[in-house]
Amino acid sequence: MSTVVALDGLLATRRLWRGQPARQAPSDAIATGWEALDAVLPGGGWPQGALSEILLPADGVGELRLVWPALARLAQGEGVIAVVAPPYRPYAPAWLAAGLRHAALQVIDANPRDALWATEQCLRSGACSAVLCWPQKADDRALRRLQVAAETGRTPGFAFRPVQAATNPSPAPLRIAIDTAPHRLRVLKCRGALVPPAPLPFPAVAQPG
């Protein structure tokens, strides 16, 4: 009892700092379809209602293959995937082979400034099952708006950005970098869990949803 009283005194005089409870891992995460990646992510997948950043050394290093299994499940039924200002025209046969029907894709053409606005509106509306975007020069403020919009609309957003952005802070709860030599994934940030100490080999075979 005397120990409890002593602690109360220390807290009252601000000589002892009370830590905040640890964040709980999200319970509504979306399985990525890649077993090894799910195993290290909080809740076992992509965060729902949040922005995930995928950082690339160049276009075409497997970034779409990484998200296709989750998108295929989200697009089931009447789900719609918004693809905002992609750098290249989506190759329909590849998306179809990944399990994404044509009617589920809504490709939005926009200049860089309007693309941020369109992404924010798609995320905030809650009408999309997922939103993909390529904000090349988005600053912290712009990314924070996207994160808030994703939270408001309870919609997962995927932002593909140059790997150089890894040196800047980001409000996105999840940041993953893709390396090409060797081909692997580095989880740089995952809110709700510790960052894995070692990279993961780039996944080869998706797990069925």
Image (cartoon, rainbow, N blue to C red):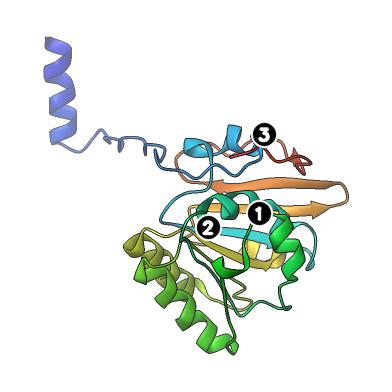
The mark total stands at: 3
Give the label on residue 99, or none. Answer: 1
Kindly tell me whether residue 63 is visible in this rendering: no
**Is the residue 90 above or below the residue 13 in the image?**
below
Q: Which amino acid does label 2 sit on?
A: Ala
Mark 1 or mark 2, which is nearer the start of the sequence? 2
Helix, strand or loop under label 1: loop
Task: Please state the horizontal and vertical placement of residue 19, each as a whole percent of the image.
Answer: 31, 36
Give the label on residue 87, or none. Answer: none
Dot 3 and dot 1 residues touching (CB under 8 Å): no
Which one is closest to the eye, mark 3 or mark 1? Answer: 1
Q: Residue at x 47, y 56 (%)?
A: 77
Helix, strand or loop under label 2: loop
Q: Distance between the residues labelled 3 and 2?
A: 23 Å
Task: Please state the horizontal and vertical placement of residue 203, each as a whole percent of the image.
Answer: 75, 42
Dot 2 and dot 1 residues touching (CB under 8 Å): yes
Q: How far apart are marks 2 and 1 (CA)?
A: 9 Å
Q: Residue at x 40, y 41 (%)?
A: 26
Which one is closest to the eye, mark 3 or mark 2? Answer: 2
Mark 2 or mark 3, which is nearer the start of the sequence? 3
Residue 35: quadrant of the picture? top right
Kindly tell me whether residue 136 is visible in this rendering: yes
